[in-house]
Image: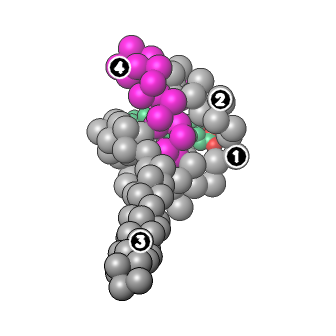
């Protein structure tokens, strides 16, 4: 009987431990666009600033942009007015990542 009690306590402890670590896991699994952020900081910062609001060189405030994801991808690829075309500088994957990143700017 005593053994069973100890076993239950251990089992309970294990279940709690499992829950706890599961919660932690889902927290760190929160998608964070690391590639997009890196590409943004390297290529877009100069005109758009860290928060996307700078309007250096005639740039627009990205946080006020109404463009959809695919429109942003096209814009980043081809450039517009003084905005540099990034087609030959960034990969498809990098362009998509940075376009998605621009939606996280506030
Ligand atoms: C040399 C300066 C410059 C750089 C570097 C630059 N941009 Fe721009 N960006 C501009 C300008 C200028 C405009 C406005 C174009 C216009 O008026 O038609 C603009 C517009 C935009 C817009 C559209 C806003 C809208 O609603 O029309 C987005 C989104 C954007 N840029 C994202 C980026 C991203 C992402 C990068 C980096 C990959 C980047 N830009 C790099 C100058 C720049």
Residue found 53% across the figure and 53% down from its top: 104
The residue identified by callout 4 is 89
Spatial CA distance of label 4 from label 2 is 18 Å
Point out which mark residue 66 bears. Answer: 1
Give whichever of discs 4 and 2 has the lower sequence position: 2
C-alpha gap between disc 3 and disc 2? 51 Å
Which type of secondary structure does the marked residue at label 2 adopt?
helix
In primary-sequence order, the first of circles 4 and 3 is 3
The residues colored magenta run 80-102
Corner quadrant of residue 80: top right
- Disc 4, SS: loop
Tag 1 secondary structure? loop
Question: Looking at mark 1, is its residue's CB closer than 8 Å to ligand 1?
Answer: yes
Seen from the viewer's position, the closer of residues 70 and 13 is 13
The answer to whether residue 24 is seen in the rendering is no
Which label belongs to residue 29?
none
For marks 4 and 2, give the one nearer the viewer: 2
Mark nearest the camera among 2 and 1 is: 2
Q: How many marks?
A: 4
Residue, disc 3: 11
How far, Cα to Cα, is label 2 from label 1?
Answer: 12 Å
- What is the distance, in whole Å, between disc 1 and disc 4 at their CAs? 25 Å
Label 2 belongs to which residue? Answer: 70
Image marks 3 and 1: residues in contact by CB distance under 8 Å: no
Q: Label 1 neighbourhood size at 10 Å, few (<14), some (14-19), many (20+)?
A: few
SS of the residue at dot 3? Answer: helix
**Residue most extreme to the left:** 42
In the rendered structure, which disc, 1 or 4, sits on the residue that comes first in sequence?
1
Q: What crowding class fits label 3: few (fewer than 14 Cα within 10 Å), some (14-19), or many (20 or more)?
A: few
Q: Is residue 67 left or right of residue 26?
A: right
Q: Mark 2 and ligand 1: say if the CB distance to the nearest ligand atom is below 8 Å.
A: no
Q: Judge depth for marks 4 and 3 and give the one in front.
A: 3
């Amino acid at each position: 009987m005593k053994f069973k009690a100890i076993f239950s306590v251990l089992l309970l402890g294990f279940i709690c431990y499992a829950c706890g670590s599961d919660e932690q896991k889902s927290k760190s699994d929160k998608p964070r666009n690391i590639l997009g952020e890196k590409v943004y900081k390297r290529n877009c910062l100069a005109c758009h600033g860290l928060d996307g609001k700078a309007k250096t060189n005639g740039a627009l405030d990205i946080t006020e942009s109404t463009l959809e994801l695919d429109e942003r991808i096209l814009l980043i690829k081809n450039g517009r007015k003084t905005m540099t075309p990034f087609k030959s500088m960034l990969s498809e994957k990098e362009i998509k990542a940075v376009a998605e990143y621009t939606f996280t700017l506030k």
